[in-house]
Amino acid sequence: MKLIGILRSLVIIASVAEAIRPPRRNCPNIHVFGARETTAPPGFGSASTVVNLVQRANFRTTSESIVYPAAGGDVYAASVAAGVAAVANQTNAFNQMCPRSKIVMVGYSQGAQIIDDAFCGGPDGSSLNATSASVSSGVSKMVAAIILMGDPRHVNGLPFNVGNATASGFAARPVGFQCPDFENIIQSYCDAEDPFCAKGNSTATHQGYGQEYGQDALRFVQRKLKGSNSKASNGPNRFHTNGGTRTGLEGKYLWMLVAGMMFL
């Protein structure tokens, strides 16, 4: 029985150590999430232009790509569904670790669609049934700007539209759609020649938003960051990195557990 008690205590010690050991570093002032277009290799894809502009323009800014299939063809709908979930999960995970860091979202093509759906809800065909936002309330409070480029959900007449497109995208929102919780921080770029957000016939137009509108997008983001009421954290909020040393808190609990074992 004594041996069982000792082994149980060792398991507890290991669990506590694992839970509070992860090394840490300061949270950024701003964290930029980027979501790539269909069939682009893992990373930011064409969203990288705006992601890089925002990161270079702001002190203590980090970035992270949304990890999802970005697949086309017959599995496009499943890819969008996975992407919406990835946006919700990754932004929430970051916000839990760094609740005072501002968030900027940048999505390109299918990447714009999954960010659009995650923040403004569905339905979106077989990809999404829910009408409410998928992101957490914490993320909703800390997101400062959302940039969408070549969004297949584009529909004419929305207050955040930029560009000369009047036709709808192939996965267009219904007429009369609104996104009241976020519409004042969204900028959505679509030109008439784009085959994906406006049923045009120029893939070059679809791929050219970073060069055409990158600086405009940056100015929009900077205005929203400046006007945001949320405060960046330089204090105790942390997120985990690999490597490092243990904290004093961890040592405290370890000694308490070791001391308890001596009385078994």
Image (spheres, rainbow, N blue to C red):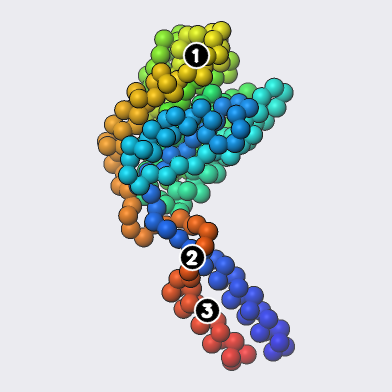
Local crowd at mark 1 within 10 Å, few (<14), some, or many (≥20)?
Answer: some
Q: What kind of element bears circle 1?
A: helix
Task: Work out which quarter of the rendered image holds the C terminus and state it.
Answer: bottom right
Label 3 sits on a secondary structure element that is helix
> Which one is earlier in the sequence, the residue at label 3 or at label 2?
2
Q: Position of residue 185 (x, y in %)?
A: 36, 30
Query: Which dot, 1 or 3, sits closer to the camera?
Result: 1
Left or right? Give the position of 56 relative to 134.
Answer: left
> Residue at left 52%, top 34%?
44
Q: Earlier in the sequence, mark 1 or mark 3?
A: 1
Q: Residues within 10 Å of mark 2 (few under 14, many from 20)?
A: few
Q: How many marks?
A: 3
Q: Nearer the viewer, residue 201 or 18?
A: 201
Query: For the residues marked 3 and 2, what is the alpha-carbon distance in whole angstroms?
Result: 18 Å
The image position of residue 192, as x and y in percent, is 47, 9
Asked if one can make out residue 233 in the rendered structure from this viewpoint, the answer is yes
**Tag 3: residue type?**
Leu
Instruction: Classify mark 2: helix, strand or loop.
Output: loop
Q: For residue 141, what is the image quadrant?
A: top left
Q: Determine the residue positioned at 48% across, 70% down.
A: 246
| Pointer 3 residue | 254
Q: Nearer the viewer, residue 238 or 173?
A: 238
Which residue in the protein does label 1 denote?
205
In the rendering, at what x and y percent does residue 161 appear?
Answer: 40, 18
Residue named by callout 2: 244
- Residue beneath the point at 53% across and 59% down: 242
Label 1 sits on what residue type?
A: Thr
